[in-house]
Image (cartoon, rainbow, N blue to C red):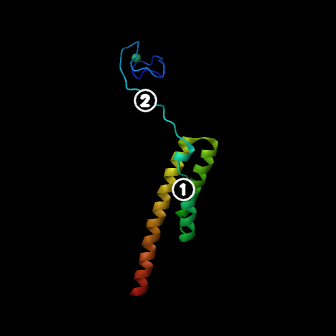
Amino acid sequence: MKCNYCGHKLPDDAIYCDRCGEAFPYEKPQTVSREDIPTHIAEAFIITILCCFPFCIPAIINAARAKQRLQYGDYNVAIEASKNAEFWINFSLIMGGIVYFIYIFSEIF
Ligand SMILES: [Zn+2]
């Protein structure tokens, strides 16, 4: 690790910098495992079957991208794609709900 203040190279478990004397809390290195990143591929497919909306397309694309990036070990991109997939799945659900509601409403009146 490097000192946040002066950039001096330090051992990974250092609790203070031996050059500038600045103390810093020991931070565990972030370990992201494959299991921590949901690909949302199943949800993306379910939403596509339930509603044939154009919003399902970005959901599937991002879910597939998250899955592919995970295989390459590219976790940062995978997390981003996973979040995008989740957004489009929720968006599709909301839009599907609104359209369904309008449909039911127009049938009654
Ligand atoms: Zn320092």
Residue 29 in view (yes/no): yes
Which one is nearer the viewer's eye here, 29 or 97?
Answer: 29
Residue holding disc 2: 27
Query: Going by the picture, which residue comes out furthest to the top?
Result: 19
Q: Quadrant of ligand 1?
A: top left
Q: Position of residue 22 (x, y in %)?
A: 35, 18
Q: Residue at x 63, y 45 (%)?
A: 71
In-front residue for pair 17/51: 17
Camera-nearest label, 1 or 2: 2
Q: CA distance from mark 1 to mark 2?
A: 30 Å
Q: Tell me residue 48's x, y (percent).
A: 56, 66
Indicate left or right for 23 with 66 as reference: left
Can you give x and y, in whole percent of width and height, for residue 106 in the image?
Answer: 42, 83
Q: Quadrant of residue 16?
A: top left
Q: Crowding at label 1, few (<14), some or many (≥20) Cα neighbours within 10 Å?
A: many
Which element carries disc 2, helix, strand or loop?
A: loop
- Label 1 amino acid? His
The reply to whether callout 1 and callout 2 are in contact (CB within 8 Å) is no
Left or right of 49: which side holds 7?
Answer: left
Task: Report the front residue among 26 and 86.
Answer: 26
Percent x, y of residue 89? 50, 60
Residue topped by disc 1: 40
Q: Secondary structure at mark 1?
A: loop
The quadrant where residue 63 appears: bottom right
Query: What residue do we see at 45% from left, 74% from top?
Result: 99
Q: Amino acid at mark 2?
A: Glu
